[in-house]
Amino acid sequence: MEQADAIAGLGALAQVTRLQLYRLVATQGAAGMSAGNIAERLGVAPSSLSFHLTNLVEAGLLSQKRTGRQLIYAVRPATVASLRDYLATLAG
């Protein structure tokens, strides 16, 4: 993982709502979670949720796929593993 990618990932998680959102979606595994269910569970307004989801998708931490009329978000394990490995190299 490049330094810029690590900074983008860490920056995306360095905000309370996005960290809560990420943790919630991570509990759903590969099946992911619809934006509507995320909004309901977190009590976040749709416009605010859209902003936070876009940030996490752009950082590569979440994937987004359309299923019918729903957008489903899931954790991207490879990106998360790369970020973890990058941080481990910093520890020596």
Image: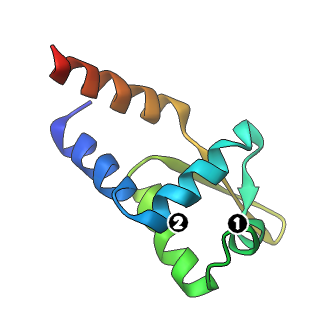
Q: Amino acid at mark 2?
A: Leu
**Label for residue 87?**
none
Tally the numbered discs: 2
The furthest residue to the top: 92
What percent of the width, then of the height, locates residue 83?
Answer: 34, 32
Q: Is residue 80 left or right of residue 64?
A: left
Of callouts 2 and 1, the N-terminal one? 1
Query: Closer to the camera: disc 2 or disc 1?
Result: 1
**Label for residue 38?**
1
Tell me how far mark 2 sits from mark 1, CA to CA: 10 Å
What percent of the width, then of the height, locates residue 73?
Answer: 65, 55
Is disc 2 placed on a helix, strand or loop?
A: helix
Kindly check if marks 2 and 1 are in contact, taking CB atoms under 8 A apart as contact.
yes
How many C-alpha atoms fall within 10 Å of the one at disc 2: few (<14), some, or many (≥20)?
many
Q: Amino acid at mark 1?
A: Ile
What percent of the width, then of the height, locates residue 33?
Answer: 74, 55
Q: In the picture, residue 80 is in which quadrant?
A: top left
**Label for residue 53?**
2
Q: Is residue 86 above or below residue 56?
A: above
How many C-alpha atoms fall within 10 Å of the one at disc 1: few (<14), some, or many (≥20)?
many
